Image (cartoon, rainbow, N blue to C red):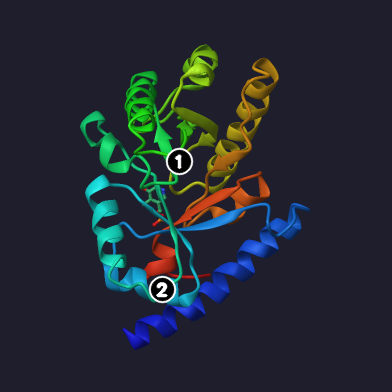
Amino acid sequence: MDNYLDLMRARREQILERFYAALDRAGRPHDAASLIAVSKTVGVDETVAAIQAGYRHFAENRPQELVRKLTGLAEHPELPEVRFDMIGNLQTNKINAVLGSAELIHSVGSLHLAQAISSRAVRKIEAGELVGPQRVLIEVNVSGEESKRGFSPDEIRAAAGELAELEGICVQGLMTMAPRGNKDVARRTFAGLRELRDELEAAHPDLNLPELSCGMSEDFESALEEGSTLVRLGRVVFSPEFAVK
Ligand SMILES: *Cc1c(COP(=O)(O)O)cnc(C)c1O
């Protein structure tokens, strides 16, 4: 793991340099966005190395893996505290495993799922097992790709009022995934997410959507230039083979 830790440290320097340069180009302050290390493809040891390299904010895309990482890290009380978010498809029967363990659930892609999280969170709050509403983001399929999950822009326009009123959850922003392989389309997807957020906030004064979760290993700089507040980086953080430009 020593070599891996050295690699992670060097990689982190490179990533942060690009991260801050992108914010500079957009005239945004350096604390306008956070970098999330997506640890879904690595084990507890690599996650420990990432913490030692300086990362404090992580995300997982499967509930079982979130639990595995939290359990594994509990055996390292010497490490600083870190935060985990949930970014993947969430089945209703797995919600209870994630409630309270994930600080933010980025992947609420249907009204049905939002309602299911809401009712379980209300129950947990009443039982004293959850301190406050679960923070969530709404996943939107901005690019319209068939393969992508999430609300279509029209669906979220129709459902936003109802989402804002659900108890037990607090909607804090929007999340999207850009299509792979085309930088112009990716940038337009990120800009589209920001414009949709502005439109929803204007239409619903009770909705406050400061968070925009977008940008991954291949496109995080353009996401930051378009207003992302949470970039989710997997391969560029953890994979020695990933080509860093
Ligand atoms: C895996 C994953 C990422 C990270 O992808 P990379 O291209 O490896 O940076 C980001 N967001 C979600 C939802 C993911 O599933």
Label 1: how many Cα within 10 Å (few below 14, some 14–19, many 20+): many
What is the number of the mark on residue 49?
none
Left or right: residue 59 versus residue 11 is left
Q: Residue furthest bottom?
A: 2
Near-viewer residue (25 or 188): 25
User: How far across and how far down the image is residue 118, in percent?
Assistant: 39, 25
Tag shown at residue 79: 2
Residue at mark 1: C-beta within 8 A of ligand 1: yes
**Amino acid on which disc 2 is placed:** Leu
Mark 1 element type: loop
Residue most extreme to the right: 27
Q: With respect to residue 125, does 51 lie above or below?
A: below
Q: Please give the name of the residue rendered at 48% of the width and 41% of the height, measured from the top-left corner.
A: 178
Which residue is pictured at 67% across the width and 58% down the height? 22
Q: Please determine whether, in this image, residue 121 is positioned above or below residue 230.
A: above
Q: Is residue 154 above or below residue 18?
A: above
Residue 4 locus on image (x, y percent): 36, 81
Circle 1: residue type: Met
